[in-house]
Image (spheres, rainbow, N blue to C red):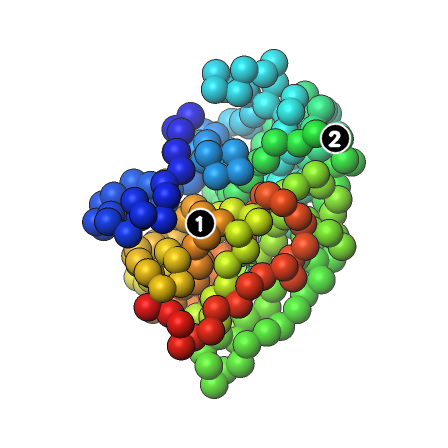
Amino acid sequence: MEIRYESSPREVERMNTSELRENFLVEQVFVEDKIQVVYSHYERLIVGGAKPVNNSLTLGTYDALKSEYFLERRELGAINVGGKGYILADGQRFDLDKLSCLYIGKGVKEVVFHSEDAGNPALFYILSAPAHASYPTTLYTKEQAFPMTIGAPETSNHRTVYKYIHADGIDSCQLVMGLTILHNGSIWNTMPPHVHDRRAEIYLYFDVDPAHGVMHFMGKPDETRHMWVRNHQAIISPPWSIHSGAGSASYSFIWGMGGENKDYTDMDFVDLNLLR
Ligand SMILES: O=C[C@H](O)[C@@H](O)CC(=O)C(=O)O
Ligand SMILES: [Zn+2]
């Protein structure tokens, strides 16, 4: 498991492209027949992916956690961005079509990821946060996820937001998770941008055409930086940073957070005149 430490706004101001990418971009989330994870010291979020193809994949624990099993002191959300699959949580089976989300609570000892069809494997995106209590393991399909359409074609940010794990959705300790689908022809996510110093956020870009990409913007609103991001890559966004992107074509992304509250609407919007 790779460990990523925090960087201060002062450090980020001085980073060049490769330093920004080393600190904030996760280049490979899905590796065939592996569970791949990165431990971020921002809110101690663990981000990663499980891509079972020829075998099922069991979520083991990691040295850095000093725990008997992964979810001993953690909770986890998994969203499938690939073909049909299922997850066994202590033996109980949950089927996940593309864009279904499974929340797995603290205390579940065995988590196993399966694909239905090796020819079209499931891609389980994983986000996990420390947890102090156990909430029920719960599945939401995309249809259950409170779709909300925002933005407009005129501003190239027309998009539908699906909220799965949050204050009014699936219960959790601190994990918040959902996804956003850009409408055809719209390219901007989270524009106008916002910050929420109470929560760190992690993005996974998906359904990005391989011939295209997304320019992702981060940094303090008056000190922005950018990174070119491809399909199935993740971005770690510090609490003080904006997180926004413009694609060379439409795309989708999963957003997930941990921190002080689970209130999706708690965002401090940035006046576009103040961006630098
Ligand atoms: O804090 C919330 C997250 O940044 C995302 O929900 C924003 C988003 O999906 C969007 O505006 O497109
Ligand atoms: Zn946000």
The residue at 67%/49% (across/down) is 262
Q: Nearer the viewer, residue 64 or 181?
A: 64
- From the top left corner, tell me how far across and down residue 246 is, in percent: 38, 67
Cα distance, mark 2 to mark 1? 26 Å
Question: Under 8 Å from ligand 2: the CB of mark 1?
Answer: yes
Q: Quadrant of the N terminus?
A: top left
What secondary structure is found at the residue carrying circle 2? Answer: loop
Q: Note whether 18 is above or below 44 in the view shown.
A: below
- From the top left corner, tell me how far across and down residue 242 is, in percent: 44, 59
Crowding around mark 1 (Cα neighbors within 10 Å: few <14, some 14 to 19, many 20+) is many
Kindly tell me whether residue 116 is visible in this rendering.
no
The residue at 61%/31% (across/down) is 130
Q: Amino acid at mark 2?
A: Ala
Kindly tell me whether residue 132 is visible in this rendering.
yes
**Which residue is the extreme one toward the bottom?**
154
Say which residue label 2 marks. Answer: 133
Q: Earlier in the sequence, mark 2 or mark 1?
A: 2
**Which residue is the extreme one toward the right?**
136
Say which residue label 1 marks. Answer: 237
Marks 2/1 in contact by CB < 8 Å: the verdict is no
Count of number-bearing discs: 2
**Which labelled disc corresponds to residue 52?**
none
